[in-house]
Amino acid sequence: MDLFTPLKLGALDLRNRIVMAPMTRSRAAADGLPTAIMADYYRQRASAGMIVSEGIAPSADGLGYCRTPGIYNEKQIDAWRVITHAVHNEGGCMVAQIMHVGRVANALNKPAGSKTVAPSAIRARGEIYTDQRGMQPFDDPCTLALEDIARVIADYRQATENAFVAGFDGVELHCTSGYLPAQFLCSGTNKRSDDYGGSVANRARFVLEVLSAMASVDGAGRVGMRICPDNPFNDMHDDDPQQTFEYLLHEASVLDLAYLHAMRYPPGRVDNIELGRRYFADRVIGNESFTFDEAQRAVAAGELAGVSFGRNFIANPDLVERLQGGMALSTFDLATMYSPGAEGYSSYPRALA
Ligand SMILES: Cc1cc2nc3c(=O)[nH]c(=O)nc-3n(C[C@H](O)[C@H](O)[C@H](O)COP(=O)(O)O)c2cc1C
C-alpha cells in the first residue's frame, strides 16, 4: 500500500491518497461569487485523490477575507457547479471546506449588512488585509445570542445541502486556525456562561451540533473535519488543548464521519496525529510540511490513510504525476499567493505537456 493506492473514506472514493489541502487564494468576485479561473485552477489539479476546496463561507456573516467565496445563494451554487463539473470531468473528487471566520474579519471584506460575530465579544489582536485600505485591525465582534447560534448551525446545514446541489462529493468542517468553531472550543475566546461556554463539554457543543447538522443532510459518510489543536494562529489560546480535543474527538468519533484531517502543528503540547489516530483510527489524513518520502512511509506503515499537500499544489498542478514519476517540483511565487487574476494561480504549467 502506498500513496497511489485507491482509498475509500466513508462514502468518498479517492483514486489515490494524495489530497490537495484547502487553500484560500482570494480569486473570487465580489459577494463571494466563484470565478471562471477557479474552474481552471481546480480542473488542473483534479488528479489529486481528493481536492479540499478553499474555505467557503456558509453565510455572508461567515466571510472575512477579501475575495473569498461563499455558498449561500443560487448564483454561488451555480458557479460552484461549473467547478465541480470541471473536476469530475477529469475523474476527480472534491469536497467543500465550510469555513465561517467568526471574529477574523474586517467589515471592508464583507457584504453590506453582514455582521462580524463570535462566541464572546473579544477582538482578535492583529490585522487583516483589505483591498480598499491595506492592513486593517480586526472588527470588534458581536456576541452570538442563543437564537443566533441556532441560526448559524442552520447556515452550516444549508451550506452542506447547497454544496451537494452544486455537485461536491463531500464537505469538510474547518475547525482550526482561529475561525468560528475554534473560537467556541478555546477557553481564550469563549467566555460564555450558557450551554455553549465554560466546561469542555459546553465549549465543544457548537462544533458537535454543527457536525450533526452537516451529517443530517446526506449522512456522516460525506462529512470530514479538519483540526489543529493548540494552533495559535489568529490570536488563539486554549488552557488545555489536549483535554479539549480528547473530548471533542471522542464525541465526534461516535458520528462515524468520513475522515479526520489533522495538521501536525505546532510541535509542542499536543501530538495532533497521534490524538487523531486514537479516535479516527484508519481515517486520518495528515498534513503540514510532509515530504513525499515521509508521506509514503506514513501510509505504508498504516499510520495515515492519506496525506494532504498544500503549498506543493500551488506551483505543481500535476503534483500526483510528478511524485509518481520522480520529477522535480516547481516553487511558487509568494507575491501572487492572494493577488487577483490568473497569474500565479492557474498559470503554472505541467511538467509534461
Ligand atoms: C495560501 C494558503 C491558503 C490556505 N488557506 C487555508 C484554508 O482556506 N483552509 C485551511 O484549512 N487551511 C488553509 N491553509 C493551510 C493549508 O491547508 C495547509 O495546512 C498548509 O499549507 C500546510 O500544508 P503544506 O505544508 O503541505 O503546505 C492555507 C495555506 C496556504 C499556503
Image (cartoon, rainbow, N blue to C red):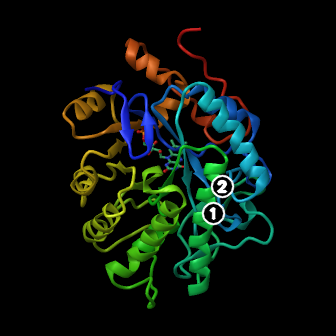
Q: Is residue 276 above or below residue 40?
A: below
Front residue of 140/246: it is 246
Ligand 1 within 8 Å, label 2 CB: no
Q: At 24% from the left edge and 56% from the top edge, which residue is drawn?
A: 275
Q: Is residue 36 above or below residue 32?
A: above
Contact, mark 1 vs mark 2 (Cβ under 8 Å): yes
Residue 250 appears at what percent x and percent y? 27, 66
Residue located farthest toward the left when viewing the structure as drawn: 301
CA gap, disc 1 and disc 2: 6 Å
Q: Is residue 346 above or below residue 69?
A: above
Q: At 40% from the left edge and 12% from the top edge, which residue is drawn?
A: 325
Residue located farthest toward the top when viewing the structure as drawn: 353
What is the number of the mark on residue 53? Answer: none
Residue 237 appears at what percent x and percent y? 38, 70
Element assignment for label 1:
helix
Residue 208 appears at what percent x and percent y? 42, 70
State the quadrant of the C terminus: top right
Mark 2 Cα-neighbour bin, 10 Å: few <14, some 14–19, many ≥20: many
Q: At 44% from the left edge and 36% from the top edge, which residue is drawn?
A: 13
Q: Amino acid at mark 2?
A: Asn
| Residue 104 appearing in the image | no
Q: How many marks?
A: 2
Q: Specify the quadrant of the image occupied by residue 153.
A: bottom right
Element assignment for label 2:
helix
> Which residue bears the numbered disc 1?
158
> Which residue bears the numbered disc 2?
162
